[in-house]
């Protein structure tokens, strides 16, 4: 199956145009030859019209092109009329999207007032009770017929009013019907979305986009690749646009790294027509990251160096790995400095000599974040993978791409992996986040995104036994970035991992404040994954991979989870962090922080 136009010569996937609003006065066109559209979501109560208007205007001022607003009830959906009217009165015609979960009635109300409606097939007219049940083909068909009867009215109304839809599946929030047939898998997410798309098509409605979101960047990448391949198989008129996002990415550097790995990797392969970066921060900061991703995309995907600016396109060839199922490339164990590396060992962190000299004297003896090898001390075979090169002298020889190669970094290392496979070689590979000097010093944000996109994309392909981050000029920051990137990519775990949803009108507590409070108590718990979810919509399903969950159950009341299972209910918010610590302790995952 083919998931993108070319993994070797980056170009954008052709997608049909989906119009959202009136482009003549503030609307946008998603897909076609139009630029990738940036969007975000309000964090306030949908019934607070004034605050919704204020936040929307604030987002538009920083370049947001589509604004999403949650509509959990019919009452909330009805208030979208007042929000839209006030915005239009103020001359703001940005398209609005109603975010719908569970209630078809709310969708039917919302579609009257906004330009687009997002529905989640996992909980729109379908059940999600984590029930184990065998579905016969007859029972499965009956459920699909029931879903079609509930979804069709929205499709017909959207067609009548000229609205758009987003069919958005989320990892961990699939229906019991899909879960019992396909499991909580990328295939289940894709099939769930295609079921709803077929209903749209039966009514000659094509004004929709797809999304496949997960808090795990590798899962998210697999889902979008599989969806794009399946759409290609269905036929040329299935070329619907793709909305990209890593859900519950969190905050700060970690949230940006996860988002860059997932969104940036797919953009570099030509997938994606609209993007949303989900951060547990004020929404305008999401648009700043979108701007950086899109501004730097040409640099990450363009070939050529000052010495060879017009290198011809590479011949198309088969990948040496399955792009739809993650599996680490097989390599021979080979020491890296004094540490075991390659094979099944951890992906290691290499630094340049100047970085080592700057940070080594300040690193504590037991520190988890430390240089593991020095680039200049390694016995490296550096090659141009676009040209023939000899078989490495032995399989324990480390191999990397030469710095003067006129190829995009991702393409160059993919080609290296394919060339080594053709030689029958399992040599370990050292990845670099860039091959040539950037021309001018990168901002810290651009450096973080470059390392995350280039290295994250390759690690998601299963390529790489060690990484070298060079885009970040600060030695301490660059070292920390390398470890954070490996954790976000699922290659190492050296600290607590947090899955935190962005705020929205459904949120039952202040996510930023509570996240900071939980981190202050638990950020020393190496290898523990904690989900912080503002409401039941984003938990328990969408925190599927977490060890423990802190979920808003009612105003000022918190439910605690172990995995997907709720174990404590209606805990007063001012006691909930202490009870979370108790729960972690009960399950043997707690350790006291070491003295500074």
Image (cartoon, rainbow, N blue to C red):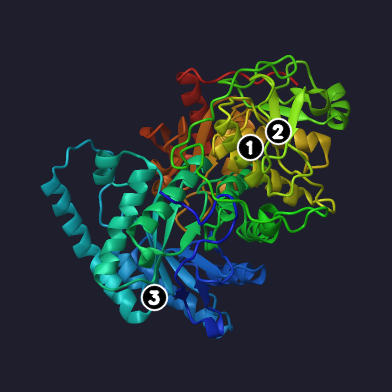
| 2 and 1 marks in contact (CB < 8 Å) | yes
- On the rendered image, what quadrant is the C terminus found in? top right
Q: Which of 316 and 201 is in front in this view?
A: 316
Marks 3, 2: nearer the viewer: 2
Query: Secondary structure beneath disc 3?
Result: loop
Percent position (x, y) of residue 199?
26, 64
Callout 2: 10 Å neighbours few (<14), some, many (20+)?
many
| Residue picked out by circle 1 | 416
Position of 337 with respect to 528 (left or right) is right
The residue that appears at 53% across and 38% down in the rendered structure is: 574
Q: Quick one: label 2 or label 1, which is nearer the N terminus? A: 2
| Residue picked out by circle 3 | 163
Disc 2 to disc 1, C-alpha distance = 8 Å
Res. 400 mark: 2
Q: Quick one: label 3 or label 2, which is nearer the N terminus? A: 3
Position of 518 with respect to 18 (left or right) is right
Q: Does any portion of residue 575 appear in the rendered image?
A: no
Disc 1 to disc 3, C-alpha distance = 46 Å
Percent position (x, y) of residue 301?
66, 54
Position of 569 with respect to 474 (left or right) is left
Res. 509 mark: none
The residue that appears at 33% across and 66% down in the rendered structure is: 106
Q: Quick one: label 1 or label 3, which is nearer the N terminus? A: 3
């Amino acid at each position: 199956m083919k998931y993108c136009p070319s993994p070797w010569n980056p170009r954008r996937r052709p997608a049909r145009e989906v119009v959202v609003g009136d482009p003549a006065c503030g609307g946008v066109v998603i897909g076609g030859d139009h630029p990738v559209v940036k969007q975000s979501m309000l964090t306030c109560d949908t019934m607070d019209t004034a605050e919704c208007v204020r936040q929307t205007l604030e987002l538009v001022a920083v370049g947001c092109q589509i604004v999403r607003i949650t509509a959990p009830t019919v009452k909330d959906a009805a208030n979208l009329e007042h929000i839209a009217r006030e915005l239009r009165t103020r001359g703001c015609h940005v398209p609005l999207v109603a975010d719908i979960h569970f209630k078809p009635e709310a969708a039917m109300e919302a579609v009257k007032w906004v330009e687009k409606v997002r529905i989640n097939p996992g909980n729109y007219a379908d059940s999600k009770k984590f029930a184990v049940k065998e579905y016969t083909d007859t029972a499965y068909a009956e459920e699909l017929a029931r879903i079609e009867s509930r979804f069709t009215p929205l499709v017909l109304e959207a067609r009548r009013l000229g609205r758009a839809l987003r069919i958005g599946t989320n990892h961990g929030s699939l229906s019991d019907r899909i879960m019992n047939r396909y499991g909580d898998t990328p295939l289940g997410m894709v099939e769930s979305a295609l079921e709803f798309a077929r209903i749209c098509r039966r009514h000659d409605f094509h004004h929709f986009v797809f999304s496949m979101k997960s808090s795990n960047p590798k899962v998210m990448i697999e889902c979008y690749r599989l969806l794009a391949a399946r759409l290609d198989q269905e036929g040329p008129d299935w070329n619907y646009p793709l909305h990209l996002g890593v859900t519950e990415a969190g905050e700060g550097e970690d949230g940006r790294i996860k988002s860059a790995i997932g969104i940036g990797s797919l953009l570099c392969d030509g997938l994606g027509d609209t993007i949303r970066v989900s951060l547990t921060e004020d929404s305008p900061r999401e648009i700043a990251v979108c701007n950086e991703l899109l501004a730097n995309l040409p640099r990450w995907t363009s070939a050529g160096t000052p010495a060879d600016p017009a290198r011809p396109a590479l011949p198309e060839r088969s990948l040496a790995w399955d792009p739809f199922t993650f599996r680490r490339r097989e390599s021979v164990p080979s020491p890296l400095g004094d540490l075991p590396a390659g094979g099944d060992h951890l992906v290691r962190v290499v630094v340049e000599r100047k970085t080592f000299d700057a940070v080594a004297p300040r690193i504590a003896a037991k520190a988890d974040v430390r240089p593991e090898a020095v680039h200049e001390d390694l016995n490296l075979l550096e090659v141009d993978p676009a040209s023939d090169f000899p078989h490495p002298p032995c399989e324990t020889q480390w191999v990397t791409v030469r710095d003067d190669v006129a190829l995009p970094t991702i393409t160059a290392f993919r080609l290296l992996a394919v060339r080594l496979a053709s030689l029958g070689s399992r040599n370990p590979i050292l990845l670099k986040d860039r091959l040539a000097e950037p021309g001018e010093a990168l901002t810290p944000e651009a450096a973080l995104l470059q390392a995350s996109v280039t290295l994250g994309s390759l690690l998601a392909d299963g390529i790489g036994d060690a990484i070298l981050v060079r885009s970040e000029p600060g030695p301490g920051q660059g070292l920390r970035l390398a470890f954070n990137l490996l954790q976000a990519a699922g290659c190492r775990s050296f600290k607590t991992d947090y899955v935190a949803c962005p705020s929205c009108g459904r949120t039952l507590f202040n996510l930023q404040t509570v996240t900071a409070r939980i981190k202050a108590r638990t950020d020393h718990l190496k290898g523990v994954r904690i989900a912080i979810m503002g409401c039941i919509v984003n938990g328990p399903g969408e925190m599927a991979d977490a060890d423990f969950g802190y979920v808003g159950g009612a105003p000022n009341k918190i439910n605690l989870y172990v995995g997907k299972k709720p174990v404590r209910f209606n805990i007063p918010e001012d006691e909930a962090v202490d009870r979370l610590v108790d729960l972690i302790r009960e399950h043997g995952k707690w350790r006291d922080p070491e003295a500074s």
